[in-house]
Image (tube, rainbow, N blue to C red):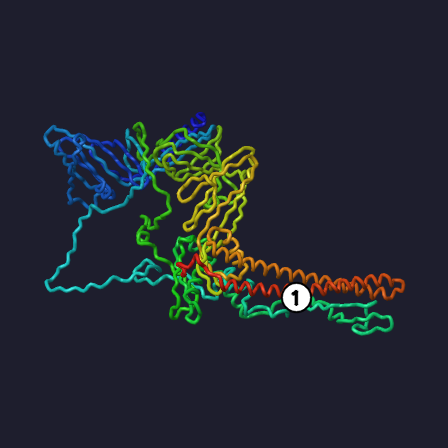
């Protein structure tokens, strides 16, 4: 490792020489002090540099020449003190100076050195504009959990002044930097008042709580959906594509749907062709019951459903709404925009207030399903509003007052999720000379620290990879300062192995820096989502309002192609409004993201699950199969009270009976069809054997089989009738149980809160 780092040091020194001897950047004017040299220069990353000068003053006067373009920075940062007593010294400068001059002359009065031959030591510091310094790092991967890190700061001297024997330092912090006019003379324009002046003060303009940040600005509508454009989810009473346990008025009319199979009893031989339903002469077989047509069960073909123009139009409108949601969701996520979803209802519809809120909740759930963070959408129940049709309006919510004014210097909005800014200060240990128009590399850190080669799976970053994990190096910051963002060159055993870019590394914190992609760790991903009922709120006429946990799961399967064990760090950023239900135990926090640690043996495959949940409000039909499946999970959870659990278990048992009975009817009908087909085959065979005089015995055998199958047909018909009667009674009991069901654990919460 030391041999490798020696090569790195040589490369760094060579880089310094190239910068110093190469292209000379443009220089600027600098603050000039008579016969006073620089003692220290510290360059910061907010566009300024700190200068320190020490002078011996004779005669009580010290002249400073300040460039006009730097006078404001100089005046707001200048400190002049006596080096011995630390007393501040006054500074004066005349106003009658030529406006065309490049410099302003300022005179420092030093009272302690006013007598002839008397001297005083003066310490002068100030801040002026300067180029930011750039960090770069070298990492050499060693063994036994150790790596060597070197950090260098590239400092550009564009001041126009040679820095001779100067202590050069670099630093960064959260300090703000700005320009402020302190040179211009300012006067205040005052208003002339009269004794009889009268004033009327108008009230301030009303400000909407959302819909724009400017006063008087109308709410900014993002999108609008009519009621017929809102897709009802599975389990909703108005869902068009889901079958339900029918209500009492929709029950089937007793046995109308039972297949009339009829019973057939054949005598010695079947009827002859052309003599069906009547005698066929001496010794001929006689059909004593129905004709063949009567005996045959109807083969019900699956006919195409009749076209319903109204339903087709509704589906087309719902498709339009889906496209609006699909186009809107990425914009909300990208702009980090908060949206208010307003629900509206018609005055003529029953339960208008509840239906308006239901519409808003459905659209909110759809946006969350499309990837919008729950914290960015909220619902408001507007109910019945004159001139507004049933549906929803999505309105942009104004940012909080702090966000509305919290802008960076360049006009861009400050990111509240940005990582914290650390404090850094590195200084050269020996004075150095930096000629004007050249650059220098200042050593910030060179130390051995904890670290190792690992892998990083980052599917979230712009330059991440959703299929493979990156080669990476994990290391710990060995300093007491933050290491700023910069390029990293990574070396292995006497060789270069890659390069990356590090995020800011706080003191004593860990960082994982990706530097290569060897595709040795493969990742397969499977995303799923489901809804789990967590609380029942209201129940009216079989329509249930419930609080549902929308659970989304991300299953990652890592497969190692390596011949050695390794660690993989997974980058995952929890979103606001989501609760983590399942994730690996060990992780580090880097900004808003988490790095989860996974250990893989050689050739091993391991599955990791990330599960998150967010609460949704859903309206459900208890007769829907989707709702009943959700109720099964809810009953097994600790959420329902014992009384409610008992009611739900009874309801689910009846529903299970309905499903089983319906399945049995379907099976019996299929069996009857098979019997009928077999009877047709036997009938054709018996007709064929009629022509063969020596086949009387075989003909009789087939006729006996036909009688047996006829008996089975009769029994199957009876079983179908009994099963359908049982099904009808079970549906009646289901509706009765549903009507008697109460919600004892939700009596205190009869209204849904948005």
Residue 699 quadrant: bottom right
Expressed as whole percent of the image width and height from the top left, the position of residue 423 reads 32, 37
Nearer-the-camera pick, 75 or 237:
237
In this orientation, which residue lies closer to the viewer: 629 or 160?
A: 629
Quarter holding residue 744: bottom left
**Point 76% across, 70% down: residue:** 292
Packing grade of label 1 (10 A; few <14, some 14-19, many >=20) is some
Describe the element under mark 1 as helix, strand or loop.
helix
- Place of residue 743 in the rendered image (x, y in percent of width and height, measured from the top left): 45, 59
- How many marks can you see? 1
**Can residue 367 be seen from the camera position used here?**
no
- The furthest residue to the right: 694
Q: Is residue 596 visible?
A: yes
Relative placement, left or right, of 491 versus 257 is left
Where is 57 relative to 412, above or below? above
The structure residue drawn at horizontal position 54% and vertical position 67%, both measured from the top left corner, is 247
Please state the horizontal and vertical placement of residue 187, each as a whole percent of the image: 16, 52
Q: Which residue is mark 1?
A: 721
Return the residue nearer the eye: 534 or 205: 534
Left-right relation of 52 to 57? right
Q: Position of residue 641 (x, y in %)?
A: 46, 54
């Amino acid at each position: 490792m030391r041999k490798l780092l020696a090569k790195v040091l040589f490369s760094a020194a060579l880089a310094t020489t190239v910068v110093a001897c190469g292209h000379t950047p443009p220089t600027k004017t600098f603050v000039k002090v008579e016969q006073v040299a620089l003692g220290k220069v510290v360059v910061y990353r907010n566009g300024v540099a700190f200068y320190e000068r020490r002078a011996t003053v004779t005669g009580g006067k010290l002249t400073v020449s300040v460039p006009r373009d730097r006078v404001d920075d100089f005046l707001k940062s200048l400190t002049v003190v006596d080096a011995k007593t630390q007393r501040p010294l006054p500074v004066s400068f005349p106003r009658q100076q030529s406006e065309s001059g490049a410099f302003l002359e300022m005179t420092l009065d030093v009272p302690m050195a006013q007598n002839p031959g008397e001297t005083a030591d003066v310490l002068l510091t100030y801040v002026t504009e300067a180029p930011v310094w750039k960090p770069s790092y070298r990492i050499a991967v060693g063994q036994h959990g150790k790596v060597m890190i070197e950090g260098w700061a590239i400092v550009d001297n564009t001041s126009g002044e040679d820095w001779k024997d100067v202590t050069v330092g670099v630093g960064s912090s959260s300090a703000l930097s700005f320009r402020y006019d302190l040179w211009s003379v300012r006067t205040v324009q005052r208003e002339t008042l009269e004794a009889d002046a009268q004033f009327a003060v108008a009230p301030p303009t009303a400000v909407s709580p959302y819909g724009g940040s400017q006063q008087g600005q109308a709410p900014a509508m993002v999108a609008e959906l009519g009621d017929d454009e809102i897709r009802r989810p599975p389990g909703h009473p108005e869902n068009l594509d889901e079958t339900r346990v029918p209500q009492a008025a929709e029950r089937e009319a007793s046995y109308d749907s039972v297949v009339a199979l009829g019973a057939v009893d054949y005598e010695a031989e079947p009827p002859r062709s052309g003599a069906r339903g009547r005698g066929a002469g001496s010794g001929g077989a006689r059909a004593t019951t129905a004709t063949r047509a009567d005996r045959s069960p109807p083969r019900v073909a699956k006919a195409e459903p009749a076209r319903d123009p109204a339903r087709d139009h509704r589906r087309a409108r719902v498709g339009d709404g889906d496209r609006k949601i699909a186009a809107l969701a990425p914009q909300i996520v990208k702009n980090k925009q908060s949206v208010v979803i307003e629900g509206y209802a018609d005055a003529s519809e029953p339960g208008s207030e509840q239906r308006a809120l239901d519409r808003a909740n459905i659209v909110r759930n759809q946006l969350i399903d499309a990837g919008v963070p729950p914290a960015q959408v909220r619902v408001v129940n507007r109910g019945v509003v004159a001139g507004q049709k049933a549906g929803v309006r999505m309105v942009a919510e104004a940012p909080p007052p702090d966000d509305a004014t919290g802008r960076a210097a360049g006009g861009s909005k400050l990111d509240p999720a940005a990582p914290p800014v650390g404090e850094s200060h590195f200084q050269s240990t020996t004075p150095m000379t930096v000629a004007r128009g050249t650059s220098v590399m200042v050593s910030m850190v060179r130390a051995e620290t904890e670290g190792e080669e690992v892998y990083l799976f980052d599917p979230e970053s712009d330059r991440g990879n959703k299929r493979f994990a990156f080669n990476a190096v994990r290391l710990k910051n060995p300093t007491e300062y933050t290491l700023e963002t910069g390029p990293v060159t990574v070396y292995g055993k006497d060789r270069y192995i890659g390069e990356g870019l590090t995020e800011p590394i706080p003191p004593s914190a860990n960082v994982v820096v990706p530097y290569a992609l060897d595709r040795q760790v493969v990742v397969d991903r499977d995303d799923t989502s489901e809804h789990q009922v967590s609380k029942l709120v209201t129940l009216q006429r079989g329509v249930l309002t419930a609080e549902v946990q929308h659970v989304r799961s991300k299953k990652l399967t890592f497969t190692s192609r390596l011949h050695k064990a390794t660690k993989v760090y997974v980058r995952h950023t929890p979103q606001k409004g989501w609760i983590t239900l399942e994730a690996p135990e060990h992780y580090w926090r880097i900004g808003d993201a988490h790095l989860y640690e996974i250990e893989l043996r050689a050739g091993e495959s391991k599955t990791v699950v990330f599960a998150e949940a967010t609460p949704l409000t859903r309206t459900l039909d208890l007769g829907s199969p989707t709702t009943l499946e959700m109720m099964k999970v809810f009953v097994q959870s600790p959420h329902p009270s014992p009384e409610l659990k008992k009611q739900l278990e009874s309801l689910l048992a009846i529903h299970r009976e309905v499903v089983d009975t319906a399945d049995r009817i379907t099976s019996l009908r299929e069996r009857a069809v098979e019997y009928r087909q077999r009877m047709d085959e036997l009938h054709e065979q018996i007709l064929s054997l009629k022509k063969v005089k020596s086949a009387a015995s075989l003909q009789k055998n087939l006729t006996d089989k036909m009688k047996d199958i006829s008996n089975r047909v009769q029994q199957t018909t009876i079983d179908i009738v009994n099963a359908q009667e049982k099904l009808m009674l079970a549906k009646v009991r289901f509706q009765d149980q549903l009507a008697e069901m109460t919600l004892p654990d939700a009596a205190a919460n009869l209204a849904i809160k948005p």
